[in-house]
Amino acid sequence: MNTFGRNFRVTTFGESHGVALGAVIDGCPAGLEISTEEIQAELNRRKPGQSAMATPRIEKDQVEILSGIFEGKTIGTPIACIVRNQNQASKDYDFLKEVFRPGHADEGWFYKYEHRDHRGGGRSSGRETLARVIGGTFAKKILAENNATQIIAHVSSLAGVDSCDISHADFDTAEIEKNPVRCGDKKAAEKMIEAVIDAKRKSESVGGEITICIKNCAKYLGTPVFGKIEGELARGIMSCGAVRSFEYGIGSKAKHQVGSMQNKRKEGISGGLTTGDDIIITVSVKPTPSISQKQKANTPNGEISDFVIGGRHDPTIPPRLVPVLESMVAMTLADFLLESPDRMNQVFR
Amino acid sequence: MNTFGRNFRVTTFGESHGVALGAVIDGCPAGLEISTEEIQAELNRRKPGQSAMATPRIEKDQVEILSGIFEGKTIGTPIACIVRNQNQASKDYDFLKEVFRPGHADEGWFYKYEHRDHRGGGRSSGRETLARVIGGTFAKKILAENNATQIIAHVSSLAGVDSCDISHADFDTAEIEKNPVRCGDKKAAEKMIEAVIDAKRKSESVGGEITICIKNCAKYLGTPVFGKIEGELARGIMSCGAVRSFEYGIGSKAKHQVGSMQNKRKEGISGGLTTGDDIIITVSVKPTPSISQKQKANTPNGEISDFVIGGRHDPTIPPRLVPVLESMVAMTLADFLLESPDRMNQVFR
Amino acid sequence: MNTFGRNFRVTTFGESHGVALGAVIDGCPAGLEISTEEIQAELNRRKPGQSAMATPRIEKDQVEILSGIFEGKTIGTPIACIVRNQNQASKDYDFLKEVFRPGHADEGWFYKYEHRDHRGGGRSSGRETLARVIGGTFAKKILAENNATQIIAHVSSLAGVDSCDISHADFDTAEIEKNPVRCGDKKAAEKMIEAVIDAKRKSESVGGEITICIKNCAKYLGTPVFGKIEGELARGIMSCGAVRSFEYGIGSKAKHQVGSMQNKRKEGISGGLTTGDDIIITVSVKPTPSISQKQKANTPNGEISDFVIGGRHDPTIPPRLVPVLESMVAMTLADFLLESPDRMNQVFR
Amino acid sequence: MNTFGRNFRVTTFGESHGVALGAVIDGCPAGLEISTEEIQAELNRRKPGQSAMATPRIEKDQVEILSGIFEGKTIGTPIACIVRNQNQASKDYDFLKEVFRPGHADEGWFYKYEHRDHRGGGRSSGRETLARVIGGTFAKKILAENNATQIIAHVSSLAGVDSCDISHADFDTAEIEKNPVRCGDKKAAEKMIEAVIDAKRKSESVGGEITICIKNCAKYLGTPVFGKIEGELARGIMSCGAVRSFEYGIGSKAKHQVGSMQNKRKEGISGGLTTGDDIIITVSVKPTPSISQKQKANTPNGEISDFVIGGRHDPTIPPRLVPVLESMVAMTLADFLLESPDRMNQVFR
């Protein structure tokens, strides 16, 4: 199942060390203005090699549009975009034929499919998410044109450093892209950077948290009862590799609330529908499984072997995950914006 | 969107105070033995009027099977089950024509659809979940026959009382159905009951937490990349009204972990696929929005009015939500158990 | 797969001799006025026992609405309707446990599912189509309100009698419901009735043809390239049991045309989209497989036995199929009327 | 809707004069051996410039595999294939900005989407079907490995010449690829070629008929009641541009049959399921709308203008449609071969 969405449908493809990755976007309305540069700008936010926070693998991640756009605007046909892999260094991964990396998808995928592309995780690599960012760029533009909707995410916790001084929703959006950890709190960002570098020095990786704020969301998005917007948002976000939790509004603190207080809260979602108020989502992310310490690993022949990883890796995931989660949120909302009419008085051509 | 699942498809219908609620289950394989009594037993776990923890509305919630079962076994055709409403007391809800209950779906649904059934929330009522339990009963049986899979949920926190002495996964399954709060920790249960009764006395409602354990799960369920099992589980669970967070495995503590520790953890899901290890899911639930305190409420004509709720309500949601969440998990897993073959050597008739 | 449609979704259930049959309609916009009487009127056109042209099985086919309608109008939630079986005479079908009726679905369904309801074909009975008529009634109303779209079908050939004097599209719509063969040509109807009665006397059954005309169709319905309207119409119509061919516009005569002539033809569909011009569809229907002659039949134990059918049967299918095919066309068109916006300037809430 | 299938899902993209066309195949099981050469061979059967029967546009239609295949075998991930356009000659089509070609999709697509790629029909061009052939190649291999299923199509009528001497099902499969009209009857082929050349000389185009035979089909493919195999086959075939009718088995002659004869007929489909017997499908195809005669044409500003077409065109469609229809049939069957288990005893991992 490599298609996301029912109305705005994004189908992604591509392996970490294959020929190319890409996305086909079907159901995007005609007349949307979009340029290669806009897609590239979003891909650049996700691409590797941006700083010491990310893998040193160098990839330009240059996007090429193959269809669906004519004279700078969509024409209602499927939009195909591809990114060719360049710095594949596949030999770095030869040893992975004989071993399953701890904490990675390698083992399960091997037994499910039996024949696999072992190089850098193949399709289970985080590299797959670049195609999500392509889809997300189109979705963001649709949302922006519809209601000036904005989806802003930042790293609210990293390597044990919480940006706790400020409310999650009050982060400084201008600050986010200025620091390599994508934290909307300058002071916290500095501590986070130090902590990540320190972990890296210890051959360790670290987890973190991303907070997402949806502003100016169109009202009444969501389709009861199995298309409630919170369920769909959760599904999209939890489909990103290292995510371990999804919360919105009061979140996991709900368990300690009383009704009189909770009823006064504006969470941006009610009865499965957006209300137009800001929606705050919080997401926990586990540490990168690839660490350069010696570990024990399972092998295809059922044995356990000592294992020291090669290849190139991120010491932490959240900074590069920010544009990916924004994309999942944008695709989910765009999908519901394009849903069928709700009322007879909307039924016309 | 009132259908859940792609392969095992459950379509639900019915309003709180309409003629009947029900479910149509399509895609259930032929030859599954199941009786009306088994479905009724699950519905009885969810039905109202069980204790002081639940609404005093009396409903027998008697299920009738209309199709799809012949001589005690499924025949591969859609299974329709209905439950007629009895104690509708619709007049209790007449006042709801002119006001939107705080914390309820009333307002959004009114503006989305314009014409609504205001009685007791109509389809946005928690009563809708009885149809999920019907679907869940069939799903649980499929899972039990396949791999003796069990889905066990209990209330791990309620009204501020946490069942913190024991690990979430180590609760006493025999205890759960013995106390009215469905907590797998007898001592905590007693405190929870007291706390709920106390809150009720204060015209208050309380939130809580449910922990779900999946045991003996079939391996490799899930379909990368957009059908990862954690995303699908989250979607199903977050589609239940009062839920505010979904966590699995290390959950929201992921943000404070380091890779060397996390890699050793068995969370039952890896790379979007089940591994066969136990899966622990934690879910936060907000307090019931219906409380008997005086509140401010919006109205269809745009004004704000004083509001004291009538009707009959639960002081807290989690105890009755337990079988519903089990059902959502069961339906999600059954859906993937019935997925297409993954490998050419499985392609046969 | 018992659900038809992506936006306007009709899920049907029920076996010929089970407790009840019915349909759940999901995705119907709120605010559509509809009454039980309107649904009943359409069901009465399809119900058995109308004349010597149809099975003598007596069924009132009384419909009951269970959900989704409040104060005479839809509310945007799923609409469930059921019809209880009354005159089941299941014992007439006991002999079918041990034999597969020639020309019926019995054999294939037995081997596919192994456990089956043998009584009167179970779900493979033509009785299943009553649920399609329920869905069709809602679809017709949506279309009528949108663009005064009309779907009119009649029997254009029966028992070897063609209504050949008039163009297929020029039949007399007022005449159709006046004669028991539902032919829009009075003279042909009389000959058809004679021919059917004659065939019945000879223990024979006869085939026929239905012509469907769609008038005032909304423009540009259809979604290239795999949702072309002609493909979707064909799919719906070919999913009705006895249908053997689907043609539209020039139809099977296309093979003998030249481009200069064909380019001048208005067929109501171009490039997979409706054009607003009338669409003429022609459908061939095989004879009823149940005949009272002695036949050879396969059995579950692999032998061939002599076979004389019991039960009650129609001597010909087309007259009762008319409202069913109208329903399939209506559901197909309604589904596309409710499709996502095609252009950015239609994207609003 | 540019995705075909529920289990074996083929998403196609690309415009006639855009950068590239292609397909993403999702749901193809892992372990299927396939080479670029095999796909190329099928594409070569469809490509332009093969003979005087086809457009002189020269395209190599060279396929490139971007993902999903590793060491010559599928790995269970989406398979992306692209074909770059070469001989685009877009200027030939400049005049199409101001006029809608008669008999083409131009006009409807313009009003539906407003912004369109007018060059050579854009996505409504027959060139779109090359992506279907890519999908079909994979589907054919799955079917061949499963049950040695073969799908063989030939042109059974062209330009008024019927291959009437032989039964439709008895054509000479070795002959088909030997003549440029793809007719399985050598003598008829010669007459067809003459007739097409004659029509071309007269600035005319001609229609025809394709007969498809499915041999060794797996049994019991199809999913009642809305996934009956005949409906799904019809949908796929009718989604190809110029097709006007779909018949199987007795086809449109059903209307003149009697039950005692029809019951003895083996049509390969019964009750919506395949039986394992040969399935014969007959398809009528209209003449190419592009002819070099002067015609009247509508324009975007609502006027009618004289029109003489430029560009390069086929004088007749069926010979190049043969591999496309085979592909649609193959994709439809593969989709059902990969359907969920039908019985509890098939539910295992």
Image (spheres, coloured by chain):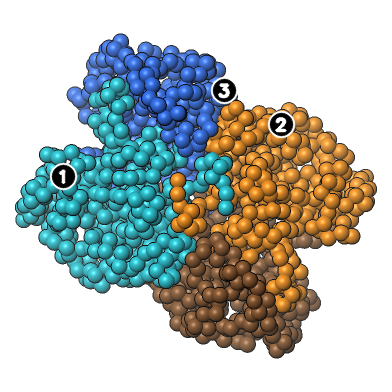
Chain colours: A brown, B orange, C blue, D cyan
Residue C84 placement: quadrant? top right
- In the figure, A157 relative to B118: above or below? below
The image position of residue B7, as x and y in percent, is 54, 47
Q: Which residue is mark 2?
A: B37
Q: Is residue C35 visible?
A: no
Left-right relation of C132 to B46: left
The image position of residue B325, as x and y in percent, is 72, 49
Q: Which residue is mark 3?
A: C84
Residue B153 is tagged as none
The image position of residue B276, as x and y in percent, is 66, 58
Which of the two discs, 3 and 2, sits closer to the camera?
A: 2
Badges 1 and 3, same chain? no
Helix, strand or loop status at disc 3: strand
Q: Nearer the viewer, residue C57 or C35?
A: C57
- In the figure, A195 relative to A10: above or below? below
Q: Which residue is mark 1?
A: D157
Residue type at mark 1? Ser
Q: Between marks 1 and 3, how big is the CA–CA gap? A: 50 Å
